[in-house]
Image: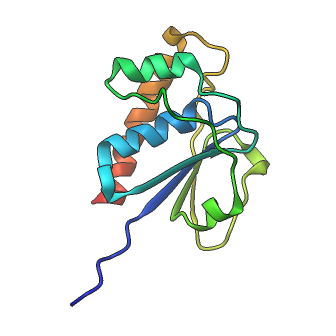
Amino acid sequence: MSTPAPRPSALFVCVHNAGRSQMAAAFLTHLAGDRVEVRSAGSAPADAVNPAVVEAMQEVGIDIAAETPKVLTVEAVQASDVVITMGCGDTCPVFPGKRYLDWQVDDPARQGVEAVRPIRDEIEHRIRGLAADLAG
């Protein structure tokens, strides 16, 4: 019997883990299901996910109200195949052999839901491409 191939894993990182990385992780989980292991973290996590981000995601049928910002750890980076950074700059640790993508996406911090919607839609578009690449 052959051993099943390990699931690919993705880590989404932004500064506060309260907006962009939460949306990206939720979209990838929604689209890829259990075919991809998904993590998100922040270099300086906020106390809570941005309420406008929660509302914008609910509009597309994805509930992230129970999510909490998590601190970025070296272990999370080491355990991930692909690391997607969104504005954390030099605070993101880099390890050889990892695939890194840096997505320049507007920060939804201190923005209302109207401003978050186009950010959400851009992230969803990028995630659809990534999901097809990772989950096959």
Could you tell me if residue 19 is visible in this image? yes
User: Eyeballing the image, is 85 above or below 17?
Assistant: below
Residue 71 falls left or right of residue 63:
right
Q: Which residue corresponds to the image point at 70% horizontal and 62% vertical from the top-left?
A: 74
Residue 75: quarter of image: bottom right
Q: Residue at x 43, y 38 (%)?
A: 26
| Whether residue 74 is situated above or below residue 53 in the rendered picture | below
Q: Left or right of 101: which side holds 92?
A: right
Q: How many marks?
A: 0
Residue in view at x 33 percent, y 40 percent: 30
Quadrant location, the C terminus:
bottom left
Instruction: In the displayed orientation, state which residue is furthest to the front.
Output: 66
Q: Please tell me whether residue 64 is drawn above or below residue 29 in the rendered image.
A: above
Q: Residue furthest left?
A: 1
The quadrant holding residue 6 is bottom left
* Residue 95, horizontal then vertical, whole percent: 68, 68
Instruction: From the top left corner, tell me how far across and down residue 43 is, in percent.
Output: 73, 44
Residue 132 visible to the viewer: no
Residue at horizontal 46 percent and vertical 34 percent from the top: 123
Residue sticking out furthest to the bottom: 1
**Which image quadrant is residue 3 in?**
bottom left
Q: Quadrant of the N terminus?
A: bottom left
Q: Position of residue 133 (x, y in %)?
A: 35, 57
Q: Colour scheme used in the picture? A: rainbow
Counting from the top left corner in percent of width and height, residue 64 is at: 45, 30
